[in-house]
Structure formats: structure tokens, C-alpha cells
Image (tube, rainbow, N blue to C red):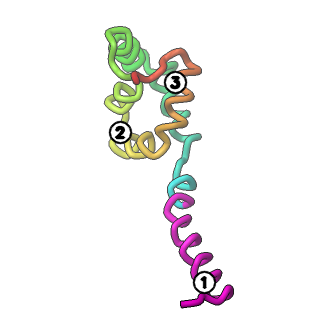
Amino acid sequence: MKFRGAPFGVLAAVVFAVAALPSAALSAACDFESVKKQIDIVLDQDKEKGAQFRRAVAEGSDSIAVIERLVSAEMREKIDVCRFHVAEYLTKRGYPPAH
């Protein structure tokens, strides 16, 4: 059986485009600015939550897990979507996540 270039090329392009849609949608869904603002509030402005965070991380807890416990359910979802950026930001702040 011999394939002709055009139909196979079109099919390959369609398959590639459909496969790329979910990853593009996920990366666009990360609203890191609001997540960063919430992390800054917990660490810099909310003395009680900041102390809880620092104490838990000093005792060996994962910094991302601790932040997730200290914020609202909606913010936890945003943190989960932006997990890579959150890990990078917490590392820059001196609180690398556990590996």
C-alpha cells in the first residue's frame, strides 16, 4: 500500500495540533502573579502564618505543602497548576521544596 504525501501530511498535522492543545491550555492556566502575591502575604505580612510556615519548613516539611495548608482552597488549586513556578520562587526566597 502506497501513501500519498498530502493526506498523510494533513493527518499528521491534525494529530500534532490536537496533541498540543492540552499542554497549551495548562500552561496558559497558571496565574503565577496572584500565587506569588499570596506567598508574599503569607511570608511577609501575616506574622502568624509566616511563623507557622518557617517553623514547619525548619522541621523538615515540604515548603509547597506548607504553603498549600496556609491558603484558601482556591489558592491551593492555583498553586497546584503553577507548581514549577512556586518551587522556583520558594527556592529563591530560601525555602526549596523537598525532593
Q: Which residue is mark 2?
A: 72
Of 6 and 4, the residue lying toward us: 4
Of 14 and 27, the residue lying toward us: 14
Give the structural element (helix, strand or loop) at label 1.
Answer: helix
10 Å crowding of disc 3: few (<14), some (14-19), many (20+) = some
Q: Where residue 12 sits: x, y (%)? A: 59, 76
- State which region is magenta: 1-24
Q: Where residue 64 sits: x, y (%)? A: 40, 28
Q: Distance of mark 2 from mark 3, alpha carbons?
A: 18 Å
**Of the residues under marks 2 and 1, which one precedes in the sequence?**
1
> In the rendered structure, are the residues bearing label 2 and label 1 in contact, judged by CB atoms less than 8 Å apart?
no
Residue type, label 1: Phe
Q: Say whether residue 6 is magenta.
A: yes
Task: Name the residue located 55 percent from the left edge and 52 percent from the top edge.
Answer: 27
- 17 left or right, relative to 58: right
Mark 2 vs mark 3: in front: 3
| Magenta stretch, overall SS | helix
Instruction: Tell me the number on the disc at residue 90.
Output: 3
Mark 2 vs mark 1: in front: 1
> In the rendered structure, are the residues bearing label 2 and label 3 in contact, judged by CB atoms less than 8 Å apart?
no
Q: Where residue 70 sits: x, y (%)? A: 35, 29
Q: Which residue is mark 1?
A: 8
Residue type, label 3: Leu
- 9 left or right, relative to 84: right
Is residue 83 shown above or below 95? below
Is residue 39 shown above or below 8? above
